[in-house]
Each structure stands twice: as C-alpha cells, then as structure tokens.
Image: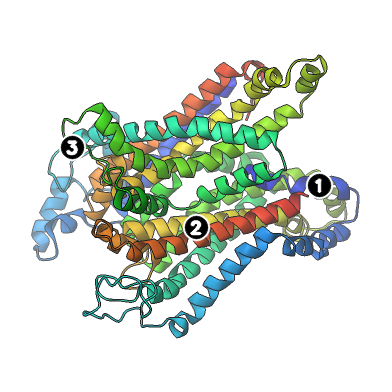
Amino acid sequence: MTDIAADPLEPSGTTLGPASAAAVAVAARGTPAPWRLLARKPTFLAGAAVIVFWIVCAIFGHAIAPYNPLAQQLLATNAAPSGAHWFGTDPLGRDVLSRVIVGARSILIICPLATILGTVLGTAFGLAMGYFGGTFDLISGRIVEAVLALPSFIVAFLFLVALGPTTINLIIVIGLVFTPLIARTVRAAVLAERHLDYLSAARLLGENRSRIMFGEILPNVMPAILVEFTVRLGYAVFTVATLSFLGFGVQPPTPDWGADIAANYGNLTAGYWWQVLFPALAIASLVVAVILITDAIEQVLSS
Amino acid sequence: MATFLLKRLGLMVLTLFILSLIVFFAGQVLPGDPGRAILGNLASQSAVQALDHQLGVDRPLITQYLSWIGGLLHGNLGKSYTYQSAVEPFVRAALINSLKLAALAFVIVVPLGIIGGVIAALYNGRSVDRAISVTGLSLSTVPEFVSGIVLIVVFGVELKVLPVTAAAGAGASPGSQFKHLILPAIPLVLILFGYIARMARAGTIEALNSDYTRTAILKGLPRATVIRRHVLRNSLLPTITVIATQTGYLIGGLVVVETLFNYQGIGNLIFKAAQAKDFPMLEAGILVIGVVYVLATLIADLLLIALNPRLRTEVGHD
C-alpha cells in the first residue's frame, strides 16, 4: 500500500542529483508540467468532476435540495421514485434525494480534516525518523511497525465506542490511526533523499536542522506525501462511511449516507431499495473519484 | 535466517504488547465508571462504588492492567456484562464462524487476484492492464456494506437466487451453509481482489524484466514454460505477504459484512458488544482478532522463507 509512494521520488532524486538546493526546490515545486499532464488525464478529470459536484452539494446542499432533508411527510412514507421525489422517500417520508445531497456535508468535512491531521503528524514523525536516524529511528520505527501490524479499522472502532462518536472524535481518531502509516511512507522517502548531494551542500553551508528538514527535504518528498494524502483520503471516506453504517460515525437525524443506509437497509426485503441504493451509489462515486485522482497523480509523478 | 526469525518474533511480542495497552486503555480507562455503566443512571452512588470494588476497578491502573494481562495469559478473557458469564465460549464459537466465511472469501479471491494480476502484467500498459488495475483499485475502496447492499438487492431481492442472511439455521447441511455464505463472501472478495492483483502484477512485471527470464527466453524455451517455471515462481512470493497483511482489512470487513448479513461471527460479536457497551466482550473480540492477525503475518513470513531459498541465507532482510 505504501510502496507506491516511494517510487515517484526516484527520478527526481537521480536526475537532479548535483544541482543546487534552490534549483532542486524550484524544480520540485515550480514546474507546471505535472499539472498540465494531470489536466489531460481523463481519469483525473472524471474524478475531479465528481468531487467538485459533491463539494458543491456539501456547501450549497440546503439551497439545491428540492425538500428540507429533515422534513417528514407522514402521508408520503416509503414512496417509490417519482416526478415529485426522484429518489423516493424514506419510512418517515423524508425526501431521499435531498438527504443524499445534504448528506455530502458531514463526510466531506470529516474525511479531509482527518486526513490532513494524519498527514501533518505523520510527515513530522516521518521527517524526524528519517532525518535523525539512529536510536530515535530504531525505537520509533519498531513502534510504528508494531502498530501497523494491528487491524487499524478495529482500533479506530474501539476508540470511537469508548469515546463516543462525535465529529471531533472521528477526526482525531481517524487522523491518529493514519499517522503511523504516513510516517512510514515519509520516512522511506526521506531515507532515499538523505545521502544526496544537495543535502550535504546544505549542511556544509551551515544551515540548521529544521531549515534542512523543512526547507530542503520536505519540498523534495512532497510528491510522495501528496500521493499518500490522496490514498489516505480514499480510506478516510471508506472508514467514515463504514463507521456511520455501524452507528459509530455521523449520528441521525443528520443526513449521512452511511447512517441512512444503516437506518433503512432492513427495508430492502420489503422492496424499498431506493432508500438504500442511492446513498450507496453516492459513497461509491466519492471513493472511486478519489481513487481515480490518486491513480492519475501517481502515473504523472512516476512518468 | 535466525536473525530474521528472531526479529519477527520480537516484533510480534511488541505488537501484542501495544495491542494489550490499546485495548486496556480504550476498553477500561476511557469509558469511565463500569459500575455506573452496568447499574445505570438511577443507581445510588454507594451501590456503584460497591460494584466497582467488586469488579476491582477502583484499584490503581497499573495493578488493574497487570491482573488483567495475567488473567489473559491464563486464558481468562473476562466476564460479559450482558450475559453475566465468561466471554470465552461466545468468542470461540464466533471465531469458528468467521474463519469459515474468511476461508471461503480467500479460496475465491486468491486464484482470481493472482490470475488477474498476471494477465495485467502480461499486457503491461495496454488497455487490458488498465482495465484490471483501475477496476481492482476502485472495487477495493468501495465499502463492503455498499457492495453488499447492491448484491442483496440484485441477487436476493430482485432475482431471488441466493439467501440474504448468512445463517443457515441450526443443523444445516454443509451445502446449505455454503450457499448462505456465498453472498456475504463476495464483498470481501471485491475488496481483496485489487490488492492481490496489484501485487501479483508488480511481482510478475519485475520477474519478466529479470535476467533469468531473458536467459530462459534466449535459450529457446516456449513462452508458456518461461512464464510458468521462471516468472510465476518468483512473482508470487511478494503476493503471499500481501495476502497475509490483507487479513487485517478482511477482519475490518467482517464487522460490516457479518452485521449486514446477520452472521454470528467475531465481527458481529464485536458490533453487538459495542452497541451494548459490553466492554469485556468487545475487548476479548478485539484481542482475538489482533492475535489472529499477528499470527497470520508470522505464518506468511515463515511461508516466505520456506518458498524463497534466497531468504534463508540473507541476513536481516526487511
């Protein structure tokens, strides 16, 4: 899973070898070529379009939705999809389309924030482990490896049961579960950079440690971090949706895809498939979109 | 090899220790007062304190941890709040059920994933490869409950060809049990396919580009023989490790799949214990899963050594 991220570094490391630190930093950050390449990838464009669509729903959901997602119409419960209710209604007569549109909000707030938290912490640890090396790396590396040997979903689940499933707890728990994974990737990327000439040059110039770590190494391992971030974002969507489905994520009556599926999948045998299928497709579209973007970024960075 | 094994065993012990700390901390420290949790909000403070004392949760944390871990090492997994009896028989029965489901999923997905990955590698960079890789990757990120629901709607509700609950009922024949497990196994298969195919693909591409493959081709062996004897033997080694590491994801998936299909496995046990805040049951379930997972990783390492003679001499392989 994480071996993907180490590859993109190789080309930049070997071809840019002896150049000055500044030039390397500029080359890694400033070249417009990767973005242009990305914009030409149909998979990236498709993924980005889907994500932009859901972001718009998350921000303007209440304005776009045809009905109030919380409004119950007790005379129109379990109505099949029709002109008035495109996606039908749920057992309380709430409009499924409106709940799907507004339901984008919770997941699009929690997942990016949790992933950012995990990426920031993981990058800090990974940089420190890779750069300082020695005993610190040895001990923290073993701990990271030992933690990674645990089923992470189960650990997150346990903590959410114990702490209670609030939005802030979801963000913190998922962010912390991601931290060792990201730390390992960043550490591997830093180790690949560590003996390159630009770092020796920076050391000889007398730059201090934090300047070298954040000013020199960080920009060069940025592609690896970017790929890791998008991969984790996909997992965050997966995890939050699953937790909500199990009742330990976003709580009802807030519209949420996973929670709505959990509330209504018992009605499947009664034939009310629309209450469940549309939120399910929403989740699937979001994860697949993130994956398409990840795949496109990886391809561009490794080409 | 001895160093490699010792390192792995050391890591396993460390992992289990961290697991025990996590489970103890999350299961016994974070939830707060167990006496209050059992007796409810209306109970008097003195009754709560008496029960806390009886449960031993008013002792210092380190003493509690040591007595808890001592009990675990003697096979005492604790007493369920819900059933007021030892959790061990529940966990054992659930584990056996889960292993059946997991085994079926693996039996389906391992050959499929390997075949998919090898085909993708043979067509490296072409549309067949892209189709297999992107499909596999996309499927592996669609949550099991989403694919599970689609399967229930299509096969269970619309076509009515397969049962939508996993439990075949008491005393059902193995054939009937198998039929009930097909639908729940598919979401797990969909998740795992992408990972296994991806690894098999990467391994095959590496083997295809190797010197020994070039030699085999140059000495005039038929393509099929080269692939079977030289490429596959080498390319499938890393796949074994991936299959073992995926056990962790499989277990996460079991919680969902078993809940969705109402199957009495370890995932469902954890879910129900979590809902009832039955922490001893929850802790036992999670510990058992952690141990199974760690063992699976160790077995994969041993298998890797057995299959790859190079590892037997290489010291400190990581």
Element assignment for label 2: helix
Give the chain letter at badge 2: A
Q: CA distance from mark 3 to mark 1?
A: 58 Å
* Image quadrant containing the N terminus of chain A: top right
Give the chain letter at badge 1: A
Q: Image quadrant of residue B186?
A: top left
Q: Image quadrant of residue A211?
A: bottom right
Q: Amino acid at mark 3?
A: Gly
Q: Which residue is mark 2?
A: A236
Q: Provide residue B279's location: percent of width, then percent of height.
A: 25, 49
Q: CA distance from mark 1 to mark 2?
A: 29 Å
User: Visible in this render: residue A195?
Assistant: yes
Q: Provide residue B173's location: percent of width, then percent of height.
A: 21, 28
Mark 1 vs 2, N-terminal side: 1
* CB-based contact (under 8 Å), mark 3 and mark 1: no
Nearest to the observer: residue B317 or residue B25: B317
Q: Amino acid at mark 2?
A: Ala
Element assignment for label 3: loop
Q: Which residue is mark 1?
A: A11
User: Visible in this render: residue A225?
Assistant: no
Q: Is residue A65 above or below residue B232?
A: below
Q: Image quadrant of residue B168?
A: top left
Element assignment for label 1: helix
Residue at the spot 60% in from the left edge and 39% down from the top edge: B198
Give the chain letter at badge 3: B
Q: Which residue is mark 3?
A: B169
